[in-house]
Image: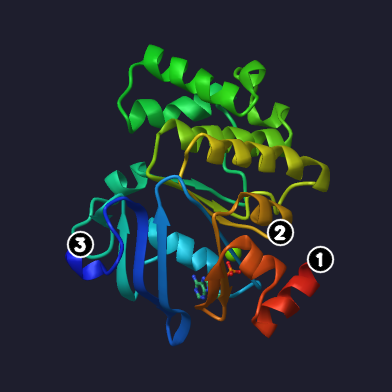
């Protein structure tokens, strides 16, 4: 597929998804999903459990193999054979629900690992950049702490610093606060607000509706593997036309 065949999107788009389909065996979990995320935008995906949100994110960095369709990240097609998956994942940050720091590395060590191994920075360069990104997430003082010495919220903030430090085309967040104690959710959401303010392109799956309303440039509502509606936070989360979305919102309040 060439750029002109992708429709109205341009190379300025960080993520372009066209006709994405995914089946697991005979079960169709994504059907004709289309999405455009422009540079610097935050797109929030909401929807019931099992609607295909995680599968959609995982197709973007090929943790899942799409069955149909095309995905472009930073102007490069990521679907199809012959794509260098390591190079692809270098350009896509991912922050998961389960916090996945290396336990035997410090906060700084976790942030600098990929900078050294993947981006090829020298130790001094990686440390400087790593410290700068820990400062950005408010953890400059915790650079030498191990994950076990940090709260879940702090660990997730290290994960965000790690993703940002690689300066990816986009960071994918899959329910980054769902595993946290309620009192720790706010600090992680605040860091995500800051990430957006710094101009990072973000695709965020979350049940935090207030965050979605305040931060999203666009909200995508997924239902049974399809994009049921897409619009401004106002259109989707405040005054949705679709009865299915109204029902979802009453349940998540
Ligand atoms: P969400 O993130 O919106 O909760 P998921 O993308 O995790 O939804 O899952 C969508 C559907 O795909 C669910 O029905 C789930 O059971 C199914 N599914 C997800 N991953 C797999 C897999 N590896 N094998 C089989 N079915 C899967
Ligand atoms: Mg999920």
Which label is found at residue 3?
Answer: 3
Q: Are marks 1 and 2 in contact (CB under 8 Å)?
A: yes
Q: What is the C-alpha distance between the residues marked 1 and 2? A: 8 Å
Could you give the CA–CA distance between mark 1 and mark 3, rounded to whole angstroms?
41 Å
Residue at 48% from the left image edge and 22% from the top image edge: 130
For ligand 1, tell me if the residue under mark 3 lies within 8 Å. Answer: no
Note whether ligand 1 is within 8 Å of mark 2: no
Q: Secondary structure at mark 3?
A: helix
Upstream in the sequence, badge 1 or badge 3? 3
Tell me the quadrant of the picture where the N terminus can be found.
Answer: bottom left
Image quadrant, ligand 2: bottom right
Q: Residue furthest bottom?
A: 26
Camera-side residue of 253 and 152: 253
The reply to whether callout 1 and callout 3 are in contact (CB within 8 Å) is no
Q: In the rendered image, which residue does mark 1 sit on?
A: 253
The residue closer to the viewer here, 97 or 32, is 32
Spot occupied by residue 114 in the image (x, y as percentages of width and height): 40, 32
Where residue 9 sits: x, y (%)?
31, 62
- Does 126 sit left or right of 172 as displayed? left
Q: Which residue is mark 2?
A: 209
Screen quadrant of the C terminus: bottom right
Upstream in the sequence, badge 1 or badge 2? 2
Q: Can residue 102 be seen in this snapshot?
A: no
The reply to whether residue 130 is in sight is yes
N-term-proximal mark, 3 vs 2: 3
């Amino acid at each position: 597929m060439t750029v002109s065949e992708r429709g109205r999107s341009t190379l300025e788009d960080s993520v372009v998804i066209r006709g994405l389909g995914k089946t697991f065996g005979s079960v169709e979990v994504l059907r004709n999903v289309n999405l455009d995320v422009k540079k610097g935008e935050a797109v929030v995906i909401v929807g019931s459990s099992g609607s295909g949100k995680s599968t959609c994110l995982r197709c973007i960095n090929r943790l899942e193999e799409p069955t149909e369709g095309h995905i472009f990240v930073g102007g490069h097609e990521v679907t199809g054979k012959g794509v260098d998956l390591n190079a692809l994942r270098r350009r896509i940050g991912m922050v998961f629900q389960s916090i996945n720091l290396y336990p035997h590395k410090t906060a700084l060590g976790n942030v600098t690992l990929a900078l050294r191994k993947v981006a090829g920075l020298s130790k001094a360069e990686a440390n400087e950049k790593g410290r700068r990104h820990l400062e950005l997430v408010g953890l400059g003082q915790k650079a030498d702490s191990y994950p076990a010495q940090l709260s879940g919220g702090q660990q997730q903030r290290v994960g965000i610093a790690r993703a940002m430090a690689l300066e990816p085309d986009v960071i994918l967040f899959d329910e980054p606060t769902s595993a946290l104690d309620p009192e720790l959710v706010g600090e992680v959401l605040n860091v995500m607000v800051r990430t957006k303010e710094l101009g990072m392109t973000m695709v965020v799956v979350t049940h935090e509706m207030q965050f979605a309303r305040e931060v999203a440039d666009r909200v995508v509502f997924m239902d049974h593997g399809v994009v049921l509606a897409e619009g401004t936070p106002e259109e989707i989360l405040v005054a949705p036309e679709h009865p299915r979305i109204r029902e979802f919102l009453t349940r998540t309040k």
